[in-house]
Amino acid sequence: MNNSTEPLGPTRTPAFAARLQKRYAAERRFKYLGMAAVGFSIAMLLFLLVTMTLNGLGGFQRAELRVDIDLSSAALSLDPTADSDAVQIRALESQGLPEVVSFSAEQSLGEDAAEELNTDAWRSVAERIIDDPGILNRSTQVWLPASNSLASAYAGDGQVQLQPLAQQLAAEGKLAERFDVGFLARSDATDPQLAGIWAALKGSILTMIVTLALAFPIGVLAALYLEEYAPKNRWTDIIEVSINNLAAVPSIIFGLLGLAVFLAIFPGFRSAPLIGGLTLALMTMPVIVISGRNAIKAVPPSIRAGALAIGASPIQVVFHHVLPLALPGILTGTIIGMARALGETAPLLLIGMRAFVATPPDGFTDNATVLPMQIFLWSDEIDRGFVERTSAAIIVLLVFLLLMNGLAIYLRNRFEKKW
């Protein structure tokens, strides 16, 4: 046997080294493409947020005129028997508050500028009187909404003949763009100076409550039954295929279903959050069922076997062990479904939730609209004021969506468990 040690030849041939370099180069290209895709997505998101913020900031402001009002000589008083602010406002109107405001505007601004005071500006004074009755006994300075014509002229649009007046009032400090606190507290109006988002925001909240209250428990129970109890036969396969298909059905189809079924059963609740929530629940439920089944299937079989081994009943295994472990995954699907439902307009168009709503809904059966529908209606207006209000409403919708998703993510992380 020859024990001599011979030197080994090279383990890598030139061809092998070339192939290895190509593989490394392909991996680097894939890495750079992935980083570029992530960077592009972040850039587009930042562009969207910055654009909406810059365009929407003007929607949170309105042109206002500074008026000095002396209410001590107007002999106005609040009604001690009134049980609501609306009754108090009507009482002040009957006592001549609009005339007092008009006279004070003429004294402070001049006759021409006083004509450009918004016709409902006296309501702002009435609301301030209700908040602080003490101003009835003294003079005060208030900022009141200008007319839409003067606001457009102040912005450089609208009637050219009003622009000198707007510039003069601005130079004297009597006309300015001020933050409109009431935008989040008022309802829709035909004048962009008086339009608000509260009615649509409250309608969205009520609609989402109905959607979640129906879609989440029914979807979770359906997922539990199909995954834990349903026999594996042809009927179960048909149900599974149907649920998967429903998740991909266009949303307007669910609107047709709501129009044909729910409005036929409840004809008096057209444009109500109850009908809107029922329609959106049908659309959201398949997403929750599919994500719930996947989350339940991901629970290790050893969890079930261990629980059965220590004497737990099948019901206890499902609800005490399997469901808590699957809940984070179920909530992920719920987040996706609710986010989709919050931004829907097509199914709500068919059930009549595009009505002009001047007062916020008091319950689930009152006439209401939702934020996406309000944005759609305002975007169809040609008035510059409504264009800015549309951008502001989009910001409100995004903030509402972030808050809703943030709460769901917190709950998901709160119930998440390791095994």
Image (tube, rainbow, N blue to C red):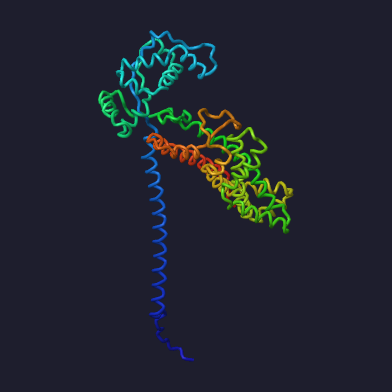
In this rendering, the answer to whether 112 lies above or below 301 is above
Q: Residue at x 49, y 91 (%)?
A: 1
Q: Which quadrant of the view contains residue 52?
A: top left
Q: Nearer the viewer, residue 230 or 140?
A: 140
Q: Residue at x 64, y 47 (%)?
A: 323
Which residue lies most toward the bottom here? 1
In this rendering, the answer to whether 339 lies above or below 1 is above
Q: Nearer the viewer, residue 72 or 43?
A: 72
Q: Which quadrant of the view contains residue 272?
A: top right
Residue 416 shows in this picture: no
In this rendering, the answer to whether 383 lies above or below 85 is below
Residue 392 shows in this picture: yes
Q: Position of residue 9 (x, y in %)?
A: 40, 83
In this image, 416 relative to 1: left or right?
right
Q: Nearer the viewer, residue 322 or 348?
A: 348
In this image, 380 relative to 290: left or right?
left
Instruction: Count all numbered tags in the image, as a single digit.
Output: 0
Q: Nearer the viewer, residue 36 or 350?
A: 350
Q: Position of residue 19 (x, y in %)?
A: 41, 75
Q: Position of residue 141 (x, y in %)?
A: 34, 18
Q: Position of residue 74 (x, y in %)?
A: 40, 9
Q: Which quadrant of the view contains residue 138?
A: top left
